[in-house]
Amino acid sequence: MKNSTLFLPGFHLATLRRRPRSERQKLADELAKIRHKSIRQLDACFTRFVPHQILQPHASGTLSRRRLFSKENTFWGFFSQILDADGGCAEVVRKFHAVAASRRFTQPSTSTSAYCQARSKLKETDLGRILAHTVAQADKPDKEGLLQGRRVIVVDGTGVSMPDTSANQHVWPQRDHQNAGCGFPQATLCACFALRTGALLSYEIGNKKNSELLLLRKQWSTFTPADIFLGDKGYCSYYDVSRFADQGVDTLMTLARRTPVTAAEADQILGDDDLLIHWPKPKWNKCLSYSYDEWLALPERLSLRQLKVTVKQQGFRTKFFYVITTLTDPNTYPAAQLAETYFQRWDVELFFRDIKTTMGMDILRCKSPSMIRKELLMHFIVYNCIRLLMVKAAQARGVATRLISFKASVQALRQWEGLLKSDINLKEQTRLVSSLCDTIAASVIRQRQGRREPRCVKRRPKNFQRLTRPRHEMLECPHRSSYRAEAA
């Protein structure tokens, strides 16, 4: 074998050994190891719904270096944490441990500190952009639906609690009747959902001083012309109906704070229990939630339609109620369709149940306001992604999305997550995702019309004392058997 560099000993001898690896090749190997250590299995299911460019490392500063807890890995770890039944930070770290052990890599630390620090560095604006991306895909026109296929946005509010820290208490204070150290910070949420798909379109968070109606007014930009606002009696307001009409948005809600108009007082009788009426402009009052100038700009009267809906199904506490709407044409919008649409308003209670009970958002875990906001954003991102996956499965199998069980979809996704490994080929990955969609579409909830579901609790609470003083001052009853818990 001829040596062409006999008199140049400092040069590489290509015929005797391998060429040294360049720095770029060494970096590529390190990136491959990090990629194998990641927990990005969920990326296979939600790659269409989460834009990758937002998860790319920053050019400099925080989350700019490729490490085990990179920006992308941290996001999917946070995503997995929300999806898990346990929901703790240690659960995510254990997943990294399992992946590293299966690939014979060096085990990372068992401490959750590195993951929590990386999670706190995720920007709230980036998470907001991801949520906006899911919202943009959430609800497309349904020409075969009720009310001429127009988009119906249902609005409702709820409350969440969080750890009792001074920072959380400052932003979202506890109730006034509770002593210091005996309660938890309480936040009020008002959210807009697409009725057809159940996807969350927008939300606002406030404290005990913010009403749901005021939080809704911060979300007016969510509505577009030709939308229909669907709400309960808490949103029955002359001012809001008028402002929605100015935007080209129609309203459908329960009558409240006004006496129903009788047939003798109506402008026109459109049918049985179907009246065309008008509301006069309310008198100015300093207690109103809008300014005097806004009151002057309101029209002197609003032309509305009043429907009396009789509940014929058993199991409902209400036997009849009144609905007010700006959809005044009885030919285009029959009374039966309006009643059916309002009956579906109950779905928003199920949407909140899916987020708070199934996904565990009822009691938040983070200890600072900034992380509370990120935790809420992540809950809504995960919720929307699951809803979009349900829509995809429903469309492929010809099933109505609102009939598919959300909890069954979450359970299926938890089990499929371990199968969607990062090293399987694209064909196998596509097959598994298709199988997951089949499983989701098969989880159809059986409709049991007229089934009575009283809001009562069968299981009795444990007879523990209530914490009525700070822990260091509280004295426990020596005989617990003699103490009875108060009614919740």
Image: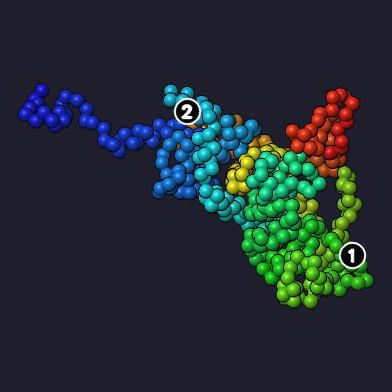
Q: CA distance from mark 1 to mark 2?
A: 67 Å
**Residue bearing the label numbered 1:** 259
What secondary structure is found at the residue carrying circle 2?
Answer: loop
Mark 2 residue crowding within 10 angstroms, few (<14) / some (14–19) / many (20+): some
Mark 1 or mark 2, earlier in chain = 2
- The kind of residue tagged 2 is Pro
Residue under the point 64% across and 32% down: 86
Quadrant (top left, top right, bottom left, bottom right) of the N terminus: top left
Residue under the point 87% across and 47% down: 316
What secondary structure is found at the residue carrying circle 1?
Answer: loop
**Residue bearing the label numbered 2:** 108
Outermost residue, left side: 7
Pointers 1 and 2 in contact (CB under 8 A)?
Answer: no
In front: 420, or 182?
182
- The kind of residue tagged 1 is Thr
In front: 158, or 152?
158
Examine the rendering and report whether any part of residue 380 can be seen: no
Residue under the point 90% across and 26% down: 482
